[in-house]
Amino acid sequence: MQLFNYIQWDPSITLVDLGFFELRWYSLLFATGFILSYMILSKYFQKENVSIEKLDKLTVYIVLATIIGARLGHVIFYDWEYYSDHLLEIFLPVRFEPTFHFTGFQGLASHGGAIAILVAIWLYRRNQHLSELWTLDKLALVVPLAGMFIRLGNLMNSEILGRPADVPWAFVFEQVDNIPRHPGQLYEAIAYLCIFGITNLVYRKVKKQNGFVFGLFLVLLFSARFFIEFFKIHQSDFEIGMTLNMGQILSIPFIIFGLVLMFIKNKNVEEHKVSAK
């Protein structure tokens, strides 16, 4: 394989560095995904006569659930052997061994974030008097967009690498090695953008019971995740030799749940509005 045939990838992870303040691409893209999601959801809430105050509270629940759940997901599903002996490092941006050093919060797992979001929605609806499935349908309209920005952030960080490849669009992540690889981050970003378009189109054009769009979202997003995992390297050593890696195993229950939900809610209904007090 000749390296000049491939895309040489060596971006700086930092967009702005003022010495006392540093803005990284990942942080900017992560925040952009949530801001655009909020703007889109505000339009849906207004259209269905639901107060923006409810969306503001929902946003707090979702942001906290995403960060905490994704962090715990990585710790539990991918690196428990290490963190079981270093509990303080789970929520501290440092490592104490072999020497003390600042790391930032490295290691987030989307499946953990997904589970935490479901818990957060359950807690949220108890106080806001909104249908749980109605709320989940709304999240299904914007989560793929946020996911796209997060994966672009991973691309800028040269992390979550793909398997070696000789396709013309292979990336050489110069900060890691000189091996041409599948740009798995880009595959996922494109897939999530397509899912964003599909869920919004179905929500607007196909009138189904609350929960159908969320089920569709689960099937599309985690099916994409399942198949794209074949193009990515293992995230942890224990996955070596496994027929399916941890990301694929964790995706299967979400796909099944989504199919069941779509089957149950596959009934045409008149669009009804959720009252907001």
Image (cartoon, rainbow, N blue to C red):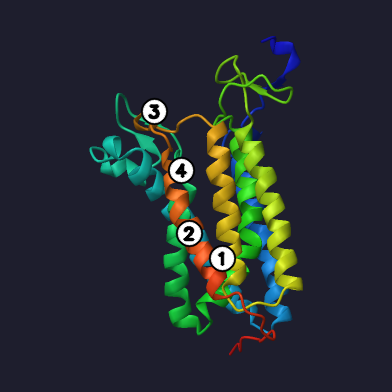
Tell me, yes or no, whether the two marked residues, 1 and 3, touch with CB atoms within 8 Å: no
Q: Quadrant of the C terminus?
A: bottom right
Mark with earlier residue (2, 1): 1
- Taking depth in this image into account, of 58 and 224 the one nearest to the observer is 224
N-terminal of the pair, mark 4 or mark 2, is 4
Amino acid type, callout 2: Ile
For marks 1 and 3, the one nearer the N-term is: 1
Viewer-nearest of labels 4 and 2?
2
Task: Report the Cα–Cα distance between label 1 and label 4.
Answer: 19 Å
Q: Which mark is residue 247?
A: 4
Which element type, helix, strand or loop, lies under badge 1? Answer: helix
Q: Which residue is tagged 3?
A: 240
Element carrying mark 2: helix
Badge 1: how crowded within 10 Å, few (<14), some, or many (20+)?
many
Name of the residue lying farthest toward the top: 2
Q: Which residue is mark 1?
A: 215
To which quarter of the image does residue 253 belong? bottom left
Please tell me which residue is depicted at 57% across the width and 29% down the height of the picture: 162
Q: Where residue 276 appears, x then y in whole percent?
A: 60, 87
Report, in whole angstroms, how far the alpha carbon at label 3 lies from the one at label 2.
25 Å
Q: Residues within 10 Å of mark 3 (few under 14, many from 20)?
A: few
Position of 127 compared to 142: left or right? left
Report crowding for label 4: few under 14, some 14 to 19, many 20 or more residues within 10 A (C-alpha).
many
Say which label, 3 or 4, has the lower sequence index.
3
Q: Position of residue 240 (x, y in %)?
A: 39, 28
N-terminal label among 1 and 4: 1
Disc 4 marks which amino acid?
Answer: Gly
Residue at the image point whose x is 73% and y is 58% from the top: 197
